[in-house]
Amino acid sequence: MLFFVLRRLAVMLATALCLTFIVFFMTNLPPNLEKLAKSEASARMSDAEVESWLEKNGFGQPVLQRYGEWLGVLPGWTVTEEGRTRGRCFARGQTDAPRFCGVLQGEWGYSSVFRTEVSEVIGRSLGATAWLMLWVMIVMVPTALLLGVLSGMREGSRTDRVLSTAAIASTATPEYVSGVVLIAAFGSATAGLSPILADWGWIEGRTLFLGTATSAMDQITFWNFALPVITIALYGIGYIARMTRASMTEVMTQQYIRTARLKGVGFRQVVMRHALRNALIAPFTVIMLQFPWLLNGVVIVETLFNYKGFGWTLVQAASNNDIELLLACSVVAVLVVLVTQLISDIGYVFLNPRIRLA
Amino acid sequence: MDELSWGQILARMAWQFWPVWIALAATFALSITFRRRLGLYGKLFDSPIGMVGFGIVMFWVFTALFADMIITFDPLAQLSGLKNKLPGTPVPGQEGAYYLLGGDSLARDVFSRMVMGARRVLAIAPAATTFAFMVGITLGLPAGYFGGKLDTAISFLANLVLAFPVILLFYLLVTPEIRVTGIPVILAAVLFIFPVIFFTVLWNSRYFTDPKRRNLYVGITLVLGLWAYSGLAFNADPLGVWSMDPNLLNVFVSVVFVNAPTVFRIVRGIVMDLKARDYVAAGQTRGEGPWYIMLWEILPNARGPLIVDFCLRIGYTTILLGTLGFFGLGVSPESPDWGSTIDDGRRLLAIYPHPAIVPALALMSLVLGLNLLADGLREESLRD
């Protein structure tokens, strides 16, 4: 078991290194650097000026070397001009600096869009996203498991047919579609439910739910957070429910279930005490592997509802070519993917005693 | 002229879709009559869910085919005075002409854009999925069959791509700056060669004992394949038949790139399961080559799950294309494809929801149809 975890960790590390290098390489392609130079210095620079600006600011070195500097395994670049030394590791205005300053030293760099430390931006946005994720999980997991168990309990029944079709429909609705539909139905002052309710005088404001979640940054309320949470949860519910259903139907055909039924145990008892525990092993993996998908949904929903969390930050970083912020975002995203994969593998072994890892 | 009521709008839309209804009726009548002779496709008509799914998918396919006859206005034309107008607004100066589903923020007809968008989406999604399948199958077969170092290496690469958040990958691959560096062309050069390899190996492994036929088939494949390849990947087709807009190539390549690793994993899994079967052992004892066994014995037996996944994946690709459009990375800003239209419409969503809702519902129904179709196919293919 220990060896398995260690090997997985090694592969994880290799993957993370490869991925960050790819992101580093892609964000540091010549056209992107030119754009960066023009936005940092002046928009009307000639090609030669761009060249010299890049040279002066440490972008002239080979990509691999700069990647090493970013990682913190190679010493940061320094330039001495007119008796003053500047460099990667120099804080603004200071004259001496540590030799190494990279991710390994905890230096994530400076965000060119938000004009502040990357670690601060990432920390703040991850905090905001954590709340969103928490509520999504609280809504999504119990609902999905309940739907899955209910429809898998009696395969082919009317309940099963209706719930399965609903699950298919929910997986067929990407977040940007359900978000748009939900806003139009509940958060629009001119269409959907809100004008009717406002006419009847049942709601205070102009809309039932708020169409943006910007105010949720300060205080989360049901009215500003429900729509984004439901939008993300809907897409996941269908998938997890289908997996739970498949696992439940398989368990319900097992010998021990039949034995329990023949013994005269009531159907409710059989489901609750015999089937449920075994049926919930497979969905556990699915739920863990759902995290990377949630990340996708988070990006879309945060953009749509203007909620300044991790996904929103990623979009800002990517569309403005904020290299160091984008790198930090991708490190976080990649870690989320890899760690959830690891947890799902290990958790699966713990939950299912039939699997033994050599 | 008065505005139309919702009943009238629906009736007029139903009337506009007349070529689609005729084509649908013909397809269903023919298919149901001959369903016993049509294999898996015919069996689809035994399952109500599959039939509904097939109906929805074919509705959009015919809409894309007959789009020119269905649209009421030019999808790019901006008529003054119709900006953000509600569904059913009459067009001033033209008797009996209406913006059936209203106008968008640039005063274009939402209905016509939605219909034209179907053509956009259905031109890219199935083709991209096919390419992804070619890549996934060509790599997944040997990885699953031979195993060992080859498998480890390709699996590592596939997992690498899968560990990327899709949206980050799109932002890295589908920006205008990237096009200058030539990375999309390199990716296209790598990804587009796979169908040629696939068919060459396919014919060669079967007919290498009969050089005359082998040379004919492989020759045709190579000539046609490399001709298309030169045009699509490098835009260097000497006759100018095959070409791809650079922007479209960029989108197409990234979508294939994102989908191929998942297909690879599925194919690899199936092959690892099937290679322990008796008929594979029998083939090996007869002295058949590994590629013959993979392509002519394992692959046909893996068709069930692959067809089902193909349907699901077209839907997923449609969602991906929509995501691209939603982040403004789509084919072109003017293009009526559904993702971009949703992105345009969402800015005024709280006040004028209709320009975003219409393409959103269209996209949802197409993906739903594909998922239902896949579900029906799965049920029917498991039955035998």
Image (cartoon, rainbow, N blue to C red):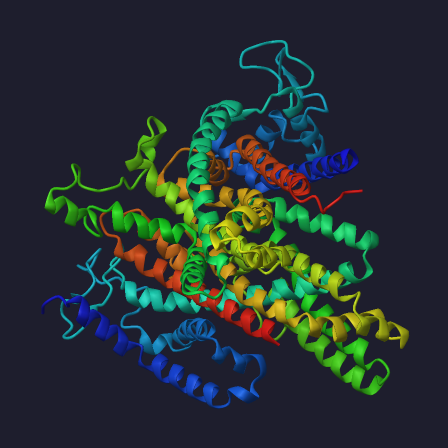
Lateral position of residue B79 relative to residue B33, left or right: left
User: What is the residue that sits farthest to the front in this orientation?
Assistant: A264
Residue A83 in the image: state x and y as whole percent: 63, 10
Between B188 and A293, the one lying in front of the other is A293
Quarter of the image for residue A284 reads top right
Residue A222 in the image: state x and y as whole percent: 31, 35
Residue B33 in the image: state x and y as whole percent: 47, 90
Between B193 and B379, the one lying in front of the other is B379
- Quarter of the image where the C terminus of chain B is located: bottom right
Numbered circles on residues, count: 0
Residue A301's place in the image compared with B217, above or below, is above
Between B242 and B1, the one lying in front of the other is B1
Residue B332 in the image: state x and y as whole percent: 43, 57
Residue A225's place in the image compared with A258, above or below, is above
Q: Is residue A238 in sight in this rendering? A: no
Lateral position of residue B276 relative to residue A327, left or right: right
Q: Is residue A107 in sight in this rendering? A: yes
Residue that appears at 46% across and 56% down = A171
Residue that appears at 67% across and 59% down = B264
User: What is the residue that sits farthest to the left in this orientation?
Assistant: B1
